[in-house]
Image (cartoon, rainbow, N blue to C red):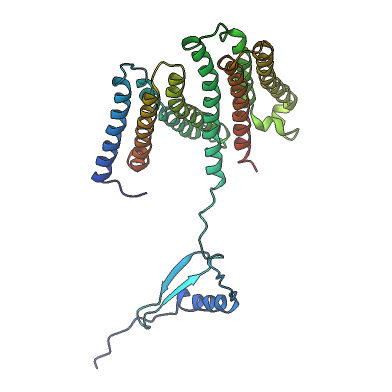
Amino acid sequence: MRRHRTQPLILPSFSDIVLPAINHLLYRTGTPGGISLQLDRHIYRASSSSPPFTIIMESRLFRFPLPPLPSAQNLRVFGVYSSGGLFALGIWFFLDAAIFSKYANAGTVHVQFVDWIPSICSVLGMIVINSIEKARLSAESFSFSGSNDAWKARLVLFLGFALMAGGLAGSVCVLVLKYVVPEYPFPTLYFGIANVVANSLIMLSTVVLWVSQNFEDD
Amino acid sequence: MPHAGLKTIIALSFVLAIGFLLVILSSALYGQYSPLFVVATYLVAPIPNAICGRYASSYNDDFMDSGSSASSILDLGRFLTGFLVLMGMALPAVLAHAGIIQWGAMVMSIIGGLLIYGTIIAFTMFFQEESDF
């Protein structure tokens, strides 16, 4: 007796039964105004015994797919890169003033060491602020080896912020005392303005770095 | 990541050649060779990232620590890379503002430097798998 060629028993799989039901539900509850629920577009094909049909499950919320939002890790990486960029921008703003004063300055007032002091303070403050292990700051719960180091970290952090704020205030001070009060015209006045811009950019860079490094912990 | 074939290499080398051509033109046309520093800056720019990435991975291997220190090292590399990239753009602008190079040389060297750096980035993106394994 010749048996019929054995057909494998085809059990109805997930995509055969569950997904049409979901699709039907989505269709029934879909808003008539045209917003169809779509999360991702899956195409499920039924197995070879049944007539081939295609289910396109649309479970997205809006018609036009939003570009995927950057993840926290990517935001953090981008923040660190842009912090470096801002720092370079600040440094080179000030160096631009100094080089301009050396090479293309027609006036008698030049960039001297006084102009460098605020930027040096800012850079030192930035190094101090970002060198601190931030886990030490957060609290008394982190007490390593019995001693509580939070106050040390806070003291050093305070020093860093004082250096940075001193740098910014010092640059404004240099701008006012050296360039604005004697009423120099613009190519000379630019030295003071570039100093203030440079210190602000270094401060902004520190803020961006701080925020993006603490971003991950949340 | 698309598969990197021969066409990719040819296109990348073409772009790299255009970038070098622009930078060298910006120097040679005006007889003032300081824009060549842009090339050096962009060539150095990916190095801190690479060094810190390798060091962080070995750090993680040595100390089975949570990644706090390793991520700090990675961040230092990223910071320096961002610094160098912006420096490559700021250097010609500073030189042009100080009257050392012409404004046309500034534009050419910035564009050329961006092409060079884009080539380096694209190359590392395309061939990362081969270098990792």
Q: Quadrant of residue B6?
A: top left
Q: Compared with residue A15, is residue A82 higher up or lower down, i.e. above or below? A: above
- Percent x, y for residue A119? 60, 17
Q: Quadrant of residue A43?
A: bottom left
- Percent x, y for residue B64? 53, 36
- Percent x, y for residue A147? 74, 25
Q: Residue furthest bottom?
A: A1
Of A145 and B57, the residue lying toward us? B57
Of A174 and B102, the residue lying toward us? B102
Q: Is residue B51 left or right of residue A150?
A: left
Q: Is residue A145 left or right of residue A97?
A: right
Give the residue displayed 52% in from the left and 30% down from the top.
Answer: A85
- Percent x, y for residue B110? 39, 29
Give the residue displayed 55% in from the left and 29% down from the top.
Answer: A86
Q: Compared with residue A51, is residue A35 higher up or lower down, i.e. above or below? A: above
Give the residue displayed 53% in from the left and 48% down from the top.
Answer: A70
Number of on-image labels: 0
Q: Is residue A106 left or right of residue B126?
A: right
Q: Compared with residue A179, is residue A205 higher up or lower down, i.e. above or below? A: below
Which quarter of the rendering shows the C terminus of chain B? top left
